Amino acid sequence: MNIPAADEPLLQVDDLSVAFHQGGRTTTAVDRISFSLQRGETLAIVGESGSGKSVSALSIPKLLSYPAASHPTGRILFKGRDLLALDEKALRKVRGNDITMVFQEPMTSLNPLHTVERQVAEVLKLHQGMSEAEARQRVIALLTQVGIRDPETRLESYPHQLSGGQRQRVMIAIALANEPDLLIADEPTTALDVTVQAQILKLLKDIQARMGMAILFITHDLGIVRKFADRVAVMNKGKIVETGKTSDVFADPQHAYTRHLIASEPKGMPPAENAGAPIIVEAKDVKVWFPIKRGFFRNVVGHIKAVDGVDLTLREGQTLGVVGESGSGKTTLGLALLRLIRSDGPIAFLGKDISRLSFDEMRPLRADMQVVFQDPYGSLSPRMSIADIIAEGLVQHGRKLDAEGRRARVAQAMVDVGLDPATMDRYPHEFSGGQRQRIAIARAMVLEPKFVVLDEPTSALDMSVQAQIVDLLRELQAKKNLAYMFISHDLKVVRALANYVIVMRNGRVVEQGPARDLFAAPKSEYTQALLAAAFNIEMINADIVAQ
């Protein structure tokens, strides 16, 4: 391994610019940035979506789409060599060997058609020329190193057969296979639950201490940066606006944008408890069991108990927070309450038992119960204008409005969520992620519902946009006296919105109670582990949460 001199940075980026050329137009995405990284050090580059942080990271191993992308200025020195000046053959020896990357979404980064063994072994055979037997032993050792239990049983698994945390561990195993000098981690924990986040960060730190590698960590989550990075560089609109030791930047931020980011954590108080408010939704012993069928005759041999005996009550103007890791049953419970999937157990909506109503019998109630999904881009039709998307419910539910009346209602709904009505004839791709989520909220609110299920509506957003959406939801609730069911694994957002919390694990409720009591003194070990991970407390119960 070629180690730079003691006084020479492992990575030195000088005056780097990145431009994209399309349709005769040139856009500068990164504008003359400079930073360095020493061996064994962690540098975090932070900023909101569109700030240029991922483009900067992808420029280092030259993984951008060339020639559409170019570097008008700058150089990238790695062990003293300018990577921008290397030809493709020389770069292939660096990528996957000296410099490796871990991306945000492991499901899209891993090949769905190849087994775990084949994908990890590929880099070993390519860069080290290992035989099949040698590669297999090395793969088992790597999977053990990244914390995959019983790795021999996972060799023949495909990505869809692994949990999100396990998939990210496989990605890390691939990245570490050739013991790189530099690991570039581009939002590697954003798509993961808080407890799995904590496990992955601890894993990276342990491996870094053992191997002495440098880590360039790209993220918009300042909570992770505060705990994980030695130094931080803050990016905004393609420029680095502030850099320094992490402790110094957080203690005394110099730039206004840095102060804005640090102040962006969701704040405010949830609605006051009101035990006398009318009950909007009440459920008893709700169960959603999916049958497991095997054999030629597809006999039922068991059940997946996605939701297993949940009781809840939600009142007007109140917010019920439902928290837990992926697979805990949160979303399934929300869909059951909306009668979008079949369930057992009585569900009362506005005092009426809806658990046995048919699709047609449910239709008149749909206007009063709405849902906002996690991914605003995936939940909005790219072929419909914003006006048509928001007005769709008005058309479907037979509101007696002509075209002009619908546009007026759409315009008011857009004003309510902080959007300019003049943009209603545009399409979803013309809006930012935060604006698209506002459109999704407007689509739900235009019908003036009484009950809204919010399924991870902030998890795909930057922290500053998260704070804006939380404030918006709080304002709409106060104005319209809405009942919210807020589903999330982000306990910071839940603390800002919910006055009552249910904690779910494996389809069952492990703890519930008023939010202030649950956050102040959680009783179950599982809730304690969730809170420890969410609020960056040292996890004393790390073994509680299974992979």
Image: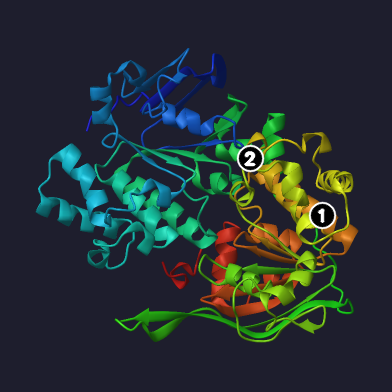
Above or below, 484 against 7 in this view is: below
In the rendered image, the quadrant that contains the C terminus is bottom left
Residue ID for mark 2: 250
Q: In whole angstroms, how far apart are the C-alphas of marks 1 and 2? A: 41 Å
Residue ID for mark 1: 446
> Relative to the observer, which residue lies in front, 16 or 282?
282
> How far from the left and from the top, in percent, is residue 361?
73, 77
Residue occupying image coordinates x 64% and y 42%: 433
Mark 2 packing: few (<14 Cα in 10 Å), some, or many (20+)? some
Above or below, 439 against 343 in this view is: above
201 left or right, relative to 321: left
> How far from the left and from the top, in percent, is residue 63?
38, 29
Write down the quadrant of residue 414 in the picture. top right
403 left or right, relative to 125: right
Residue occupying image coordinates x 63% and y 74%: 336
465 left or right, relative to 145: right
Look at label 1 and name its amino acid. Answer: Val
Look at label 2 and name its amino acid. Answer: Phe
Task: Tell me, yes or no, if residue 66 can be seen here.
Answer: yes
**Marks 1 and 2, the one that precedes in the sequence:** 2
Write down the quadrant of residue 383 in the picture. top right
> Relative to the observer, which residue lies in front, 358 or 454?
358
> Relative to the observer, which residue lies in front, 305 or 57?
305
Instruction: Please tell me whether mark 2 sits on a helix, a strand or a loop.
Output: helix
> How far from the left and from the top, in percent, is residue 105?
45, 48
Task: Tell me, yes or no, if residue 467 can be seen here.
Answer: no
Eye-nearest disc, 1 or 2: 1
In the rendered image, the quadrant that contains the N terminus is top left
Instruction: Please tell me whether mark 1 sits on a helix, a strand or a loop.
Output: loop
The number of numbered badges drawn on the structure is 2
